[in-house]
Amino acid sequence: MSSAPELKATLTLPQTAFPMKANLPQNEPLRLKRWASLRLYEELRKAGQGRPVYLLHDGPPYANGPIHLGHALNKGLKDFVVKSKTMAGYDTPYVPGYDCHGLPIEIKVDEKLGHKKLTMPVPAVLEACRAYAQKYVDLQTEQFERIGCFGRWQTPYKTMARSYEARTLEGFYRFLEKGFVYRGLKPVYWCIHDRTALAEAEVEYENHTSPSVYVRYRLTSDPADLAPALAGRDVSTIIWTTTPWTLPASMAVAFHPDFEYVALEANPPQMPGAPSLPQARVRDHETQPVYIVAAELAGQVADACKLGPTKELARFKGAVLDRVTFQHPFLDRTILGVLATYVTADTGTGAVHTAPSHGADDFYTGQKYGLDPTSRVDAGGHIHVDPAAWPQVNPPAFDRMKVWAANPVIVAMLEERGALLGGAQLEHSYPHCWRCHHPVIFRATEQWFISLETPIKSAQNEEKTFRQLAIEEIDKVVWDPAWGKERITNMIATRPDWCISRQRIWGVPIAVFMCEGCNQPIIDAALNRKIVDLFEREGAEAWHLPASDGLLAPGTKCGHCGGTAFRKETDILDVWFDSGVSWLAVCESDPDLSAAYKSFQSGHGPKRALEVLYLEGGDQHRGWFHSSLLTSVALRGRAPYSHVATAGWTLDEQGRAMSKSLGNGVDPVDIANRMGGEIVRLWVASVDFREDMAASENLMQRCAELYKKLRNTFRFLLGNLNGFDPARDRVAESELVPLDRYMLARTRELTEKILGWYEAFEFHRVYQAVNEFAIVDLSAFYLDALKDRMYTFALTSQARRSAQTVLWQITEALVRLVAPILTFTADEVWEQLPPVDGREASVHLARFPKPEEVFSENPAKLIEEWMTLLQIRDLVLLDLEGERQAKRIGKSLEADLEISAPGDLFDLLQRHADGLKELFNVSAVKVVRAEPRLAVQGKAVGFKHSLLSSVIEINPSPASGSKCARCWNFMPDTADYGIWQNVCGRCRLALKEMGIAPPKPETGQ
Ligand SMILES: [Zn+2]
Ligand SMILES: [Zn+2]
Ligand SMILES: [Zn+2]
């Protein structure tokens, strides 16, 4: 028996090769290969020829480990920018970079080489550092590509590349030749563990326990000069310090000129068992010690130093203490009273022990008063006693001790000499080395500096300081979020001179010949040019080879002292200088970027014709944004960027930083391997990057769930486009079914919004809007409403083609709009779209849809009208649900509706009469005109939901027709169609149109 064809088989169900299951971890690497074989990045560059340029200059991540979530966020956001700008019609070259020099890598290599390093020539150690950095450049490149980031990954820029090193040195020479650079003795942050100077940016504040001591400094000048009441008395001042190890370097005591100081007579209680003075002398007030402290702090100090009941003998302004003299508590040294306005009255005594070699403020005060700033603490933190101040034969106990070990020894010495008036342990916030996390010290050392006060000419030829011009340039930049501007302005306004030297080897040498006689550098532009050329050919290693000695012409004489002996400087440049000149080494020098960047610098063309964007974490206001600004302002007189965007921190769901110990880290590589790079990208899009962002396994799972929904929406769209040939079947916009027109209007509206959000880097809004559109507008509404039309109508019927036209246009628009984010999936969808002439090989070569091409009219009016229809639909669904609860109907197709509405509402429903059955998904709808029940006049549109429900009346009733076996609508005209029973007239017509003849009943056996 031949089986009769099933009626069900005549339905047109969705069909597509686009699989439901994504298998991202397996399929994404295949797509990466496809892009590589298409040479997609090169194709994008070709396509970009002649378009306006948008330049995102990559901030180089440090190449010393695999990528973490912060990196993935950073590169993900940049990729959204690059792809969205490309699709918006810009040429958007993107040259990723790596920061390769510096301490962390040198330390790692040190650890690896161990003792061997001591016998290795410097170039061999540098080779090892190079290899170490390259290993992570390669790893990070692979990981960034894995999550779908486009860029010139074959040839990224590296700060350790020879040409880059040459440009860095060239940048330094420009500073040197233009007079920005000086050598000076200065206290700098110094890590005694790593034996190196640290930049401000390399210091982190952590808690540290220090001895907190009050120390007596005895006045040696005449106390009567301060106040007559003090004549003949034993007068001292009290200083408070948490770094007793700096006391051997103590040169002065600073007082605030405007503070009130008091001279207090102390009456310390007798300690039982203490070696006591004779009773008679205790009662003799004339012999009691007198202490000078700030009036505001007197009570506090008296308590801390157990001075007993005190008596104020005199009161005077700090100014009178200028140049009085004290005796150092244990050295043979006269201590000067000095004045300084940074002295505060909130802690301590108002008398500040001043060691010019161990503090920035102290150093400047010392300069004013001509105090000796020589540090007697060596690079390893050992104290060396000043022989001039210690004439004894045996050195003091603290001599050659490390500063931390010396603390208790010095405190004991103070106590022994009766100079210790009070002491405790204090836990406080203290600067630590960012790398080794050991506490750091201030230490005066010979360093190279760039002066922020260097005179510099502005573009208008006005004489400014470097600092002033840098601040003016900040003002010309768009800071996003806006608070970044104030932040970096304050930092530039208050920062000290830039210490650019480091006593390490893995970096760009400060390649300068120094006079042995006077320790001054030779500044010779022609010589410098030769050294730059050498670096270009042989890299920074060349400086460490004897061959480079020959660069100095024989017979060269020092311009300062006439000396003829020279040595090569061995310090290297601060790594922030390296990355800070990337605009010079990359943007100005790379053939792919230089023309555009130079036109940006010269400011040609209409305003903002060319943007240069820097996009990094918020900590870069003191890092890369900062050093780039300074170098560019000094060398080019302008900021290196026009737009700076900053991202917050990635935290866990409880708002805690991610750490190994908490085990709350999210590894982007692991997520890509388990769930897909697309899920990492979707997470990046889901967060508002300007705030701190939460990430966790749980949130990644949520993104994966959402991904499934988006994917299914695309699958449903593609499935319904089966058999649709746009060239042949597309229905003109004016001929579309009204519901389809409305959805097209919505798509235009969405397109406009999304293009605006890409423009403003509001990627999380794109994410939200796409989700809402896919899940609410498409899945829950439009695609659902279309099922009857799509499945049961004749394949080629105008109404079905109308729906297909709109589904196609929605898919074409949506796939482009999500491509910057859903990089892999959009390209997969792209391949399944109905073929059209001239379609690009990848969605990434396509442009964003133009709103007016999606839908030609202004969508607002149409959408407004449909808002009312959709509100009525909500009421209908509510009533149908009531009917279902009361068991009067089952599926909504088992109901007919009668809606009575007054005035404009009736007109509106009447206008849409043909579409109401589909809109409400019932078997029949009848609209009747009602008398206005409320005094509602005017337009029907814009009714509030509640108001609407009191104006219209919805009467559902069980469907009057009988159920069609094919479309399940209840129709008045069902009849047999061959062997198929109960087929409605609409279905019979559809079957005929599709050429499916009525099957004959089986005859005979
Ligand atoms: Zn350190
Ligand atoms: Zn000299
Ligand atoms: Zn039917």
Image (cartoon, helix red, strand yellow):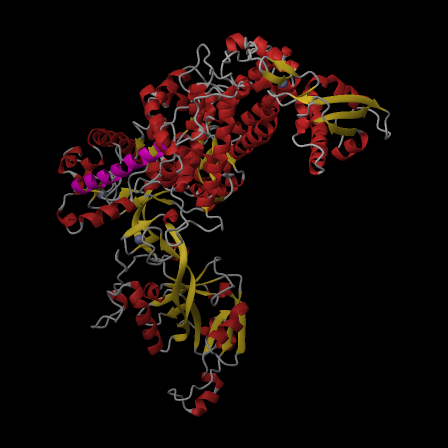
145 inside magenta stretch: yes
Q: Quadrant of residue 8?
A: top right
Ligand 3 in which quarter:
top right
* Vertical arrangement, residue 69 with respect to residue 155, above or below: below
Q: Quadrant of residue 896?
A: top right
Q: Could you tell me which residue is drawn at 56 percent across and 16 percent down?
A: 804
State the image coordinates of residue 923 (x, y, percent, origin top left): 69, 23
Q: Could you tell me which residue is drawn at 51 percent across and 16 percent down?
A: 4
Q: Quadrant of residue 661?
A: bottom left
For residue 711, side relative to residue 910 (left or right): left
Query: 733 or 668, which is in the foreground?
Result: 733
Query: 833 or 515, which is in the foreground?
Result: 833
State the image coordinates of residue 812 (x, y, percent, origin top left): 51, 19
Give the magenta-colored segment's residue range: 124-146
Q: Is residue 368 visible?
A: no
Q: Is residue 438 visible?
A: yes
881 inside magenta stretch: no
State the image coordinates of residue 158 (x, y, percent, origin top left): 30, 33
Query: 557 or 766, which is in the foreground?
Result: 766
What predominant SS class does the magenta segment belong to? helix
* Vertical arrangement, residue 636 with respect to residue 623, above or below: above
